[in-house]
């Protein structure tokens, strides 16, 4: 339980007459450490995903040692119990250091054990720990049967550890760059199963030779007392990059909007096109190329090509049942509808409880969203598997521009962990690959709207004209992407359904994603909720 201060079990100075090597067997320490120290420490961590629920108490689910000579680290698997939500598990490796200079910013607890004064810290702060785990992967045995298993890929070529540093980016896990050429990601939220990021990375790069994702180099997993294989770390190649595709797209879209004035464009005369109509570059009207430039369309074709190649690789498995393609069936239909109706209800509640956080255009749109809730629900119920002939495969699952790295003219796809809100089993369900495509289309829409909201006043056009220009641009982005994507998929015999089926799945998945995003924004950044609201109503209003 999170105790009030006067009930604390542990009072400074923290002194225990036990050695570090046996501290975790010392019940009074564990009890106080979990209730008084970790329950406060964890709330301050960037990687802690339980912030929107009320923490009730923490239990030490399991722990293991990582040891080399007299260097001992503990891997803690913490079970976080909430007042109202389902429990979550987190991984926290800890070390004891006596040197004052270590981890000044990230100390968990100052304490004295057996006359030795020092600190418990997150072990990832220690270079010695990072070196040890890297070397364990490097020297791992293929028949390793210990509870902590290290796996080395055939793509791992290094023969020594030289250096390491934190990646230092905003992220939900903790990544460290090793030898300036690889990245080890320590998963924080963990599941009693293989992490899909590890599974997909190994499958795509090691098994299928897909080049546009960081090469899988190795992993660490823990076999727990129920024999579950829990992934705790993933080692991948470091992809040189100039940032992610989200930043890239924001810059590009800003240039396109700035061109409206520069090229004296009359928005009302811009040609438009039917939604989801595939377009080769030669079919894009010259007025649109003149306005947006050719290069953005060529880059979109490149992104579409890499996306299609990822799906072709994911759909090409015949043996490993975790990856073999399958068809639509009634079980999938029931599962999908239940999931989406539940998610939609959750969004309605979240919107209704947080109406005060929305203002301006968002407040207007949310009114319409609430008025039309039954129409949206009906769209989700309108799914008939007997009409769908395409294949379902493992997909990225949380595909958006922030998951794509830009490396010169090329794109690299990453972070296959899946939708953060879904359970680990749900993240492994096979879907139509167009679900990922809808994810990236929503991201195009996001980039266009984020640009209008952030830079709108820089362009001498009314907001209505900017929206109109934005919707036109969106349709052409989609058209060019789809033509390349569908062409390549069909050449490689992956069945994504007949024309009408594809349009149905795209619309269905766009609505699903926009509703998902509404929840994400209401929780994390309500100011942005206007973007998925525009998206949801745009889809509902578009009858073409
Ligand atoms: N292999 C890699 N090479 C280069 N940059 C990477 C690599 N892996 C991650 N990154 C960078 O770190 C960011 C976060 O990575 P991601 O896998 O999305 O972590 P998380 O799951 O913690 O959110 C990415 O957006 C990217 O900028
Ligand atoms: O942190 P994750 O990468 O797992 O993804 C979550 O956060 C994303 C925001 O960073 C969120 O993406 C949404 O915002 C993006 C712009 O910041 C936009 O490109 C995406 O289309 C939009 O979905 C994602 O949904 C969420 O799962």
Image (cartoon, helix red, strand yellow):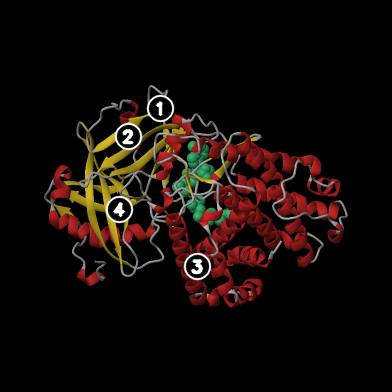
Q: CA distance from mark 3 to mark 1?
A: 50 Å
Q: Which residue is mark 4?
A: 108
Local packing at callout 2 (Cα closer than 10 Å; few below 14, some 14-19, many 20+) is some
Q: Is residue 525 above or below residue 416?
A: below
Q: Which residue is mark 2?
A: 133
Q: Is residue 183 visible?
A: no
Q: Is residue 283 above or below residue 218?
A: below
Q: Mark on residue 162?
A: 1
Residue closest to the eye, 505 or 206: 505
Q: CA distance from mark 2 to mark 4?
A: 21 Å
Residue closest to the eye, 5 or 142: 142
* Disc 4 CB within 8 Å of nearest ligand 1 atom: no
Residue 305 image-quadrant placement:
top right
All told, the count of numbered labels is 4
Residue 537 x/y as whole percent: 64, 67
Instruction: Say which element carries label 4.
Output: strand
Q: Is residue 437 left or right of residue 422?
A: right
């Amino acid at each position: 339980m999170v105790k009030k201060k006067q009930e604390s079990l542990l009072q400074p100075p923290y002194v225990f007459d036990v050695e570090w090597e046996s501290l975790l067997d010392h019940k009074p320490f564990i009890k106080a450490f979990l209730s008084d120290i970790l329950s406060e420490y964890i709330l301050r961590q960037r990687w802690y995903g339980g912030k929107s629920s009320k923490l009730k108490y923490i239990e030490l689910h399991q722990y293991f040692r990582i040891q080399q000579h007299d260097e001992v680290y503990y891997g803690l698997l913490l079970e976080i119990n909430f007042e109202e939500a389902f429990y979550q598990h987190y991984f926290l490796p800890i070390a004891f250091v006596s040197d004052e200079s270590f981890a000044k910013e990230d100390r968990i607890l100052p304490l004295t054990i057996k006359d030795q004064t020092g600190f418990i810290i997150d072990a990832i702060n220690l270079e010695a720990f990072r070196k040890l785990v890297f070397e364990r992967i490097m020297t791992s045995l293929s028949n390793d049967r210990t509870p902590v298993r290290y796996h080395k890929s055939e793509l791992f070529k290094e023969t020594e550890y030289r250096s390491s540093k934190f990646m230092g980016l905003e992220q939900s896990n903790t990544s460290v760059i090793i030898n300036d050429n690889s990245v080890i990601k320590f998963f924080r939220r963990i599941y009693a199963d293989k992490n899909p990021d590890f599974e997909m990375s190994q499958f795509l790069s090691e098994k299928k030779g897909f080049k546009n994702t960081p090469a899988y180099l190795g992993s660490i997993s823990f076999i727990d007392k129920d024999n579950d294989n829990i992934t705790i770390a993933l080692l991948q190649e470091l992809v040189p990059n100039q940032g992610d595709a989200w930043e890239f797209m924001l810059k590009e879209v800003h240039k396109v909007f700035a061109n409206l004035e520069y090229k004296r464009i009359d928005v009302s005369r811009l040609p438009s096109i039917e939604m989801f109509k595939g377009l080769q570059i030669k079919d894009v009207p010259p007025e649109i190329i003149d306005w947006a430039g050719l290069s953005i369309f060529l880059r979109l074709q490149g992104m579409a090509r890499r996306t299609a190649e990822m799906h072709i690789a994911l759909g090409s498995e015949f043996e490993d049942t975790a990856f073999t393609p399958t068809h639509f069936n009634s079980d999938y239909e029931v599962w999908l509808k239940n999931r989406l109706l539940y998610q939609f209800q959750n969004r309605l509640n979240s919107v209704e409880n947080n109406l005060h956080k929305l203002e301006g255009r968002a407040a207007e749109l949310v009114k319409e969203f609430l008025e039309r809730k039954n129409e949206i629900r009906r769209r989700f119920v309108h799914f008939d598997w007997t009409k769908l002939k395409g294949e379902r495969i493992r997909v990225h699952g949380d595909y958006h521009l922030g998951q794509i790295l830009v490396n010169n003219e090329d794109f690299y796809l990453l972070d296959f962990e899946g939708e953060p809100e879904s359970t680990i089993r749900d993240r492994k369900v096979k879907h139509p690959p167009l679900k990922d495509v809808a994810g990236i289309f929503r991201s195009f829409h996001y980039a266009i709207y984020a640009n209008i909201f952030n830079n709108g006043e820089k362009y001498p056009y009314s907001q209505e004209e900017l929206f109109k220009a934005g919707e036109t641009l969106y349709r052409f982005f989609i058209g060019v992407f789809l033509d390349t994507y569908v062409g390549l998929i069909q050449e490689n015999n992956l069945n994504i359904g007949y024309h009408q089926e594809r349009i149905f799945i795209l619309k269905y998945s766009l609505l699903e994603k926009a509703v998902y995003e509404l929840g994400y924004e209401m929780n994390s950044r309500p100011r942005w909720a206007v973007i998925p609201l525009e998206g949801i109503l745009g889809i509902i209003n578009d009858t073409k």
